[in-house]
Amino acid sequence: MSADLQPVIVGAGPAGIRAAETLVRHGLKPVVIDEAPRWGGQIYRQPPAIFQRTRQTLYGLDAKAAAAVLNTMTTLLPHISYRNDTLVWNAEGGQLDLLHQNQSSTQPYSHLILSTGATDRVLPFPGWTTPGVFTLGGAQVALKYQGCAIGSRVVFVGTGPLLYLIAYQYAKAGAKVVAVLDTATLLDQIAALPDLMVAPGLLARGIYYVSWLRAHGVPLHGGIQPLGAVGDGRVDAMRWRDSRGEHEVACDAIGFGHALRSETQLADILGCRFEFNVLQRAWLPVHDAAGRASVSGVYLAGDGVGIMGAQAAEWAGERAALALLADTDQASAPAQRARANKLEKALGRTQRFRRGLERAFPFPPTWAEQASDSLVVCRCEDVTASDLRTSAAAMGTTDINRLKALTRVGMGRCQGRMCGVAACEILAQCSGQPLKAVGRLRGQAPIKPIPFSMARTTVPSKPAAST
Amino acid sequence: MTEHCACDVAILGGGIVGASAALALRRMGFSVMLLERDLCGSRSSGVNYGGVRRQGRPLTQLPLAQRAQGVWTRLTELIGIDGEYVQSGHLKLARSPSDLAALEAYFEASAGFGMDLQMLDAKALRQRFPWLGERAIGGSLCPQDGHANPRLVSPAFAKAAAAMGADIREHMPVDEVEHDGKHFTLTCSKRLVLRAPYLLNCAGAWAGRIAASFNEAVPMVPSHPVMAVTEPLPMFMTLSLGVEGGGIYARQAPRGNCVIGGSQGYALDDQRARPSREAIALVLERTVELLPELRHAHIIRTWSGTEGYLPDREPVIGLSHTTPGLIHGFGFAGAGFQIGPAVGEVLAELVRDGASTTPIQAFSVARFTTPTQVFSSVPPSATST
């Protein structure tokens, strides 16, 4: 039976690696497809192999967890088919469309585990397209992957645990962090404590970053509203407002973000049913406690189905793989069932921690109201908040896909992956509807741009060297 | 609570045909209610390539296309926006001597229709359009043809009709249509019952069901043209392009994005369609042949839609032969965007006068229904060849 199975895992972060490990342990040989040159996902992104930095330097307090995940993958490599540097750009008729080094190929699957991860949740502020402004995730990738800082005098702005983690990582790496500006307040964080206590380890870590930054003289400001990046041709200051007035600090780079958003396009193209998640203010693919999607044979795990963090992603990846094994009669012994129950319980506790995080770092509730008309929402197609509001009013638009058709918002290179959150928030605000009612941008192939020069191969490309 | 309404003309379908008919009827003073299952202009009318092209149409369609050309040149005045309409010119390319001969034959045959076609040889093509690939050995240019943004134009016709007093109802799927000899009754679940002496069947690829329910079944099949678009690029393609014998078509929007169409996708369900991987690959390959400049560009999005095709690739436009007051306007075989606004005017004339000033005999529904009724007893062996 197992010879007929061709499970394919998309994404080699914590969820994908644990899913692969579980399948291999039960005698299957999954294909693992990953966009990055080396495994680890965004959280444990590895630098090119020739770089000499230690994991302690790269991952700090997460070094142990990172090592466990990364080493697991090393031991798995002989037992899986690993396709690194490979984009899944479409799915049709039981096959994925891949792009690797300008070659397109197809990958059949019997079962799919999607662990497609997340990107920054981008809430634009005035001047955010000025060179020198990066997303928090982008700032972190520069550091982890290339050993580069986005600047030497850096401001971090937005909200979420990532804000403090990245500020800490930059300061440790030798950059001068001139300010950390959080749209949430200390009161938010105190109110969230009871929920956050369910994961004392993670909570302690967050407190450690904040204390470390304070102890090292990094100015931390809460309850702020970003007023804008200042600079002509290159950012040279950040302006914000808080209860004490307006402020400006000189800097040569800004990292910003408001937590993360799930990468759900592949689930969408596969026809998975979505539901609106109030906590995450997003439409997410529906799944059961084990990770089964609404489409038979498709399993979902990790941040790609709702932001849960690296530890929970590991559990979800393993849980989804166990579900796949049980569904195909590969493993349904009491031991596996007990393990599955344990994982589901752990994932359940994560939900409470998630609620705590949302309370500690809430989405800025007045963001859309405060977004000025001149604010560029969609940088690919240069669409401003005013363009969106004017069009919505003129045409009576209440649906985000109609607004896209009329204004080109979400129609550019990013296909709404960056601007979609903000566009939906603004449409909800200006049309006086709840966010859920504006719907979600439809996923369309290609998931990321594909080149005209792309050559087609009918034979799946060879697994790349496992470095 | 069910709403009961009555009006002169009920229109089924808020595409460019139904919406422009609503606009024309309002200008004539009729009361109009238009029922659209989704959003006006959200199907083929809004997701098509955006060609505003007369060149290449069958001669039977040229009077209608000429009339439409007049509408397009007054577009802003009519619908309040320019819809990114540009008279860029439309160049139809030949890749072989036989294709070139076909273009020449069309040039001769269409001479009386005012399109001012110009034949260009390979040398003239290279000189005037150096960005064209080597495959083209000649072409035919229609200088006043062009392109527009269908996502803007088609909804704007509905909006203009509404501004003129047409009652436009979106998200209003019709479950039942009946005729009592004098009036049509359209029912939308428990929400709306509409009575009207005239019914315009402008339901696009889904219009066949309405026709069939009035004993005018037509052999219409759905198909799904594939579209792809690049990121915005520096302007280089000054024309809308087509290729004799099919293949692909391409234009560059004022924003700089190149829109490319070709091949066929597949239906996801009755309502939705998608490009297939084969179609996308074909479009990529053929585009680079025709437009080598795009070889380093990217496709950022693909899409498809659902369009109705009749065997002769001509639409059905005209009065029903079974039911007084029923008027058809559908089946445009992927080429309805340019003539849509003229078809709307023709449908309005048919309501008012029972006849149109533009010849439409070739599009009669009777070309499909009459033979089946007359020859329904022909043995199967006679039709199997």
Image (cartoon, coloured by chain):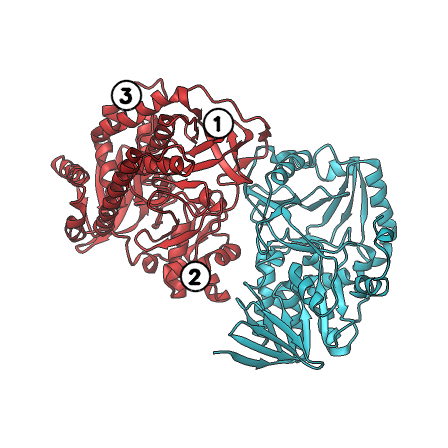
State which mark lies toward you, 1 or 3: 1
- Displayed quadrant of residue B134: top right
Q: Chain of mark 2?
A: A
- Name the residue rendered at 60%, 60% in the picture: B153
Q: Report whether mark 1 lies on the same chain as mark 3.
A: yes
Identified by mark 1, the residue type is Ala
Residue placed under numbered mark 1 in the picture = A3
Q: Is residue A283 left or right of residue B50?
A: left
Circle 2 SS class: helix
- Report whether residue A56 is seen: yes
Q: How many numbered markers are drawn? A: 3
Query: How many residues crowd around disc 2 within 10 Å: few (fewer than 14), some, or many (20 or more)?
Result: some
Q: Is residue A131 left or right of residue A194?
A: right
Identified by mark 2, the residue type is Arg
- Name the residue rendered at 42%, 51% in the picture: A274
Q: Chain of mark 3?
A: A
Colour red maps to chain: A
Q: Say the numbered circle drawn on residue A389.
A: 2
- CA–CA distance in space, label 2 to label 3: 49 Å
Query: Measured from the top left, where is residue B84 in percent x and y?
Result: 60, 56
- Displayed quadrant of residue B31: bottom right
Identified by mark 3, the residue type is Arg
Q: Is residue A233 above or below residue A370?
A: above
Q: Is residue B195 above or below residue B56?
A: below
Chain B's colour is cyan
